[in-house]
Amino acid sequence: MKEFTLSDFTDNGTFPFHIQYDVHEHTFPLHRHLDFTELVVVMNGSASHIVNNEHYPVRKGDVFVVGRDVSHGFTDASEFEICNIMFRPEN
């Protein structure tokens, strides 16, 4: 399983936030965040969100939080566009 740190997305070590826009058309494999929390806003489309081996339908307008060390990914994506707000809550 892939593990991400905030430094995989930004090289600014003094600002503990990063905002990223993603489009997923298929599967985004299970992964986890080692040192950050993620606020996800579904901008368009739908998918199945896998969280610790449970599947949850998500669609445009949904907002959810994925904490550190939580395995998650997406399957069955259809026109799935998300905005990820990544941050270190302790900063």
Image: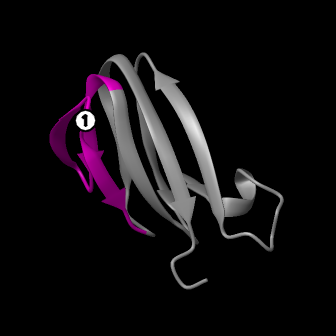
Left or right of 86, for residue 38? left
Left or right of 28, for residue 48? left
Vertically, is 63 above or below 66? Answer: above
Indicate yes or no whether the magenta region holds residue 53: yes
Q: Which residue is mark 1?
A: 61
Front-most of 52 and 5?
Answer: 5
Front-most of 55 and 11?
Answer: 11
Q: Is residue 5 visible?
A: no
Vertically, is 85 above or below 67? Answer: above
Numbered range of the magenta stretch: 44-67
Q: Quadrant of residue 35?
A: bottom right
Residue 28 rendering spot, x and y as whole percentages = 44, 32
Q: Residue at x 39, y 67 (%)?
A: 67
Front-most of 54 and 89?
Answer: 89
Q: Residue at x 74, y 60 (%)?
A: 7
Q: How is the image coloured?
A: one colour
